[in-house]
Image (spheres, rainbow, N blue to C red):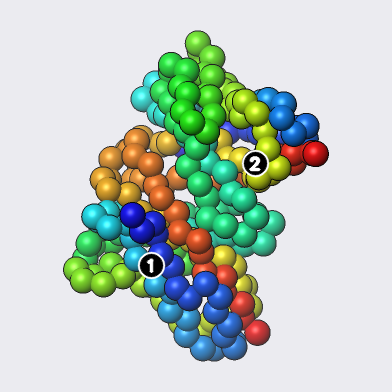
Amino acid sequence: DAKTTQPPSMDCAEGRAANLPCNHSTISGNEYVYWYRQIHSQGPQYIIHGLKNNETNEMASLIITEDRKSSTLILPHATLRDTAVYYCIVRVNGMGNQFYFGTGTSLTVIP
Amino acid sequence: NAGVMQNPRHLVRRRGQEARLRCSPVKGHSHVYWYRQLPEEGLKFMVYLQKENIIDESGMPKERFSAEFPKEGPSILRIQQVVRGDSAAYFCASSDMGWSYNEQFFGPGTRLTVL
């Protein structure tokens, strides 16, 4: 499976954009990039996923570089409720449907 | 629409007892996945089941752990003769299709404490 690298922690001021980076330099051409988050003690929550084009939904935007070796999750206006651990996951093709969660980035939104 | 339901939310067992964790997937979903999260760690895949079939159990410990997803009723993760190292949060997820690119919906988890 393609490994992902994320910074262990980040802070963001409330109301500002939170930009969470992820490196996935060994990603294969048919592997998607997924983002999930886990708010303390809760089950992971799906945020967004993409293959090579940038994606946007009501929660966030996903920017994937042209070479697909890295991506950035953008929360446009972070709120205190966005404080969570954010996981960047690359789906491994042909090995079932499990998601391989790393240790993620712990985002703290500061008032 | 009801999401993934797990019960119990908290379970306390003494060493040597059995733990049964239940997962009801999103209505209409036929694919269930179990993950374990040890304190201060990320989620680790355990097993992937479809109705009445185990598809991938590569993350399951070889002994004491078993899982099933019967034709009727919830999926069950069973841990026999629990030990303190089994203390963790166990999450269930479901999806409507078994393809590679589908979103998995996670339940709230069961927190198992072994005394």
Residue A29 locus on image (x, y percent): 39, 21
The amino acid type of the residue labelled 2 equals Asp
* Chain under disc 2: A
Residue B73 visible to the viewer: yes
Q: Residue beneath label 1, please?
A: B23
Determine which of the numbered discs, if any, sits on residue B6 in the image.
none
- Residue A57, position as x, y percentages in the image: 46, 28
Q: Nearer the viewer, residue A3 or B5?
A: B5
Residue A46 versus residue A67 in the image, above or below: below
Q: How many discs appear? A: 2
User: Which residue is under mark 2?
Assistant: A82
Residue at 66% x, 45% y is: A81
Q: Tell me the quarter of the image containing the N terminus of chain B.
A: bottom left
Give the residue displayed 47% in from the left and 18% down from the top: A54
At x 57%, y 44%, the residue is: A37
Asked if marks 2 and 1 fall on the same chain, the answer is: no
Instruction: Give left or right: position of A45 versus A21.
Output: left
Residue A21, by quadrant, is top right
Residue lying at 69% horizontally and 56% vertically, measured from the top left: B40
| Residue at the outermost top position | A66
Report the mark closest to the observer, 2 or 1. 2
**Mark 1: amino acid:** Cys
Distance CA(mark 2)–CA(mark 1):
27 Å
Dot 2 and dot 1 residues touching (CB under 8 Å):
no
Up-down relation of residue A69 to residue A57 (above or below)? above
Letter of the chain that mark 1 sits on in the rendering? B
Q: Position of residue A40 (x, y in %)?
A: 65, 55
Relative to B105, is B30 on the left or the right?
left
